[in-house]
Amino acid sequence: MYQLNAADVPEKKIYPLGDKFSGRSPDGREIGFTNYYMTLNGRPFFGISGEMHFFRVSPDQWEDSIVKMRCGGINILSGYVCWNVHEEEEGVFRFDGCRNLRAFLDLCEKHRMPVILRIGPFIHGEMRNGGLPDWLYGKPYDVRENNPGFLAAVRRLFRQLHRQMDGHYFSQGGCIIGIQIENEYQHSSAPWEMTAGVSGEWVNGGHSGQDYMLALKRIMTEEGIVTPFYTATAWGGAVTPAEEVLPLWGGYAYQPWLFYTKAGVHPATPEYIYRDNHNSAVPKEYNFEPSYDPESRPYACCEMMGGMMCSYKYRFQMDMRAVDALANIKLGSGCNLLGYYMYRGGTTPLGRVTPYLNEGQVPRRSYDYQAAVGEFGQIRESYGRLRAIHSFCRMFSGFLEETKAVLPEHLKELSPDDPGPLRFSVRVKGSSGFLFVCNFQDHADMRDRRGDEVRLILPDGGVTFRFDLAAGENAILPFGIRLGTVRLDWAAAQPLAHIGNTWFFLAPAGMTPVYCLDGREFRPRIGEAFRAGDQVLMTLSRQDAQNFWICQDAAWLCDRPLLWDGQHLKAELESGSADVYKWSQTESRFTLRARIDSGRRPVPVSFRQTGIGRYAADLPVERLKGHKQALLRVWYRGDTGSAFAGNTLISDNFCNGGCWDIRVDCDPEALRTQPLVLYLTPVRKQVTVDASAMAGLSEKAETEEAELLRAEMVLVDDDPVQEGEI
């Protein structure tokens, strides 16, 4: 039995942050912030931002990506704008192809997707030099400092960016609602890739303090880049002038940068322990040491781990449960604006002067990031798990933002790798709120929890939760919530969505659903609806919640991505078939409404070996056309993989035991006369380098392993859902 007193929680003092954090559109819409949450037209708005780098996504996939973000519950798109992508050569700006910022913003506006652009000038993002062009290296001034030379170069960049963004600002009726200034200033940097292999030299991390940050904001506004608010990353002691910009936070449980210079065993991180991050009485927590009074600004995030890239010395297949577990932790710690990095992965474009613009610790082109939406739009397990949390946030927006976090004392001394004590927190307003529970820990094993009880003392008395929860799971459990005409005293089930008089819940793995409604307990079976007064409650399993979609103000079940673009409902299929079920309000059940057979099957691809780790295949070019995309899916053993179409590197990969997807339909003409070539660098064991006279250096290895295991072609399409009784 755990007990938590939430009976005497002080009333929150909520006040607007003023003109520096607000703006109005021509049609009268207003965006603003209080010290607790974002507002839209004066009302609480629960923002959920997802990072996507438009320049790392093929333009033919921009719209699909925005639709998938919308369908996943993202209501703000954030993204870096990278200096060395647009001005690789000094004074020569490129906004063509995947660099066409204006065209991308057009699509965001088409789908009513608000945008926060993170324009630097330094961004990192695993880009070469952290996004700074090579030509800055030889200038007679330091980068990232408050000096006339660097600021003049930055002004020229901002002027060009404004020309692309002009007409798209919120004040003009457009989608750009915010701008991030710099990134992790005086906290982090990136290797100068021109010298990294020789001297280990790093880009200047900065020394000019707030003067530099304020100078950047002044230049932005002077050049016409005016938005309702500006942001800055605040973790790690980064310089954040909170009177002028909104401080944003984050957290990562997979940290490849620990192994940039050496291999090792990743420690369990404290990320999966709830913290009191919006409480003036707690001015400092793990990874949260604000330079301002915590209650004077919202606790908001822009870089919660939405995935993670493999670095050369740290490779892993990410446990997708880590992503929504972290979202649960941030919510339970008082966060009122979720922000994921990355939400949509991508591929870094080739440069003209320097072909490979990624940082040297990551693949030269791939930036899949194991994100919820992958490098080529693949939907991952984390997508559905996050969508459930986003649906919860949307469902209770207006109330959730005004609740206050209350934490048990035992969390203060809890070690990350201790699976014993229950990890929980409460967000409460009066006698209503939510119990947050997390039974996930990175890089450590948790145990199935059996028979846990949490007693909450509330102003109207109290409530006792009883539940089980599987290892690796997390849950959000409601108490004191009105469901139409019925009062939900408490539930061992997580609210998912509300349509009409039907309330959908999910039962996390290991949890038996229990509902206490107006003093009566109900124990329904998962997958069966029951009535409480005039309300209907339906409990879905975790797996069915993964396949649960809200489209056209209706609830659907489909085990393939179900996408609504505002006009058409489609199911994205790689192969095989899909059944589409729709919730029937009259029958209180899901009924089969469409059966789709794509008629497609994965096609095995035969490669011929042409050298050690080198393979070639003649792809059926004509079969690549007429589809949403064509992916070559490869399984191999080796160190790294590189795929070439002609003389162009189209994809690369650090082997982590998973499959490697390569998009092969972007330039089919390059494959018409030449084979696709895969080069798998071997894993070498017991390596020595022999040195002799006249620079006679040679590497020798006792064994070398590089083998293509299998490959298949996968054709992806959007198949329309033709609704009808079946």
Image (cartoon, rainbow, N blue to C red):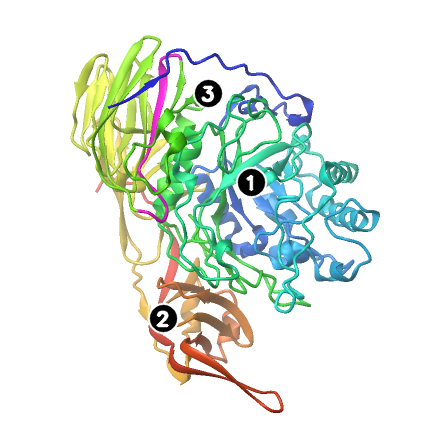
Q: Nearer the viewer, mark 1 or mark 2?
A: 2
Looking at the picture, tell me which residue is in the foreground, 541 or 682. 682
Residue 695 percent coordinates (x, y): 61, 87
Residue at 53% x, 74% y: name it. Answer: 670
Residue on which disc 2 sits: 636
- Please state which amino acid type lies under the numbered disc 3: Gly
Q: In the rendered image, which quarter is residue 242 located in?
A: top right
Which x, y percent locates residue 41?
Answer: 57, 21
Mark linked to residue 110: 1
Q: Residue at x 74, y 60 (%)?
A: 137
In contact (CB < 8 Å): disc 3 and disc 2: no
- Please give the name of the residue rendered at 68% of the width and 26% of the height, measured from the top-left corner: 20
The type of residue carrying mark 2 is: Tyr
Q: Is residue 630 above or below residue 527?
A: below
**Quadrant of the image occupied by residue 184:** top right
The circle drawn on residue 398 is 3
Disc 3/disc 2 C-alpha distance (Å)? 50 Å
How far, Cα to Cα, is label 1 from label 2? 41 Å
Q: Residues within 10 Å of mark 3 (few under 14, many from 20)?
A: some
Image quarter hosting the N terminus: top left
Above or below for 138 versus 75: below
Image: magenta residue range:
430-444
Element type at marker 3?
A: loop
Q: Position of residue 292 (x, y in %)?
A: 61, 27
| Residue 469 lies in the magenta stretch | no
Say whether disc 3 or disc 2 marks the residue closer to the N-terminus.
3
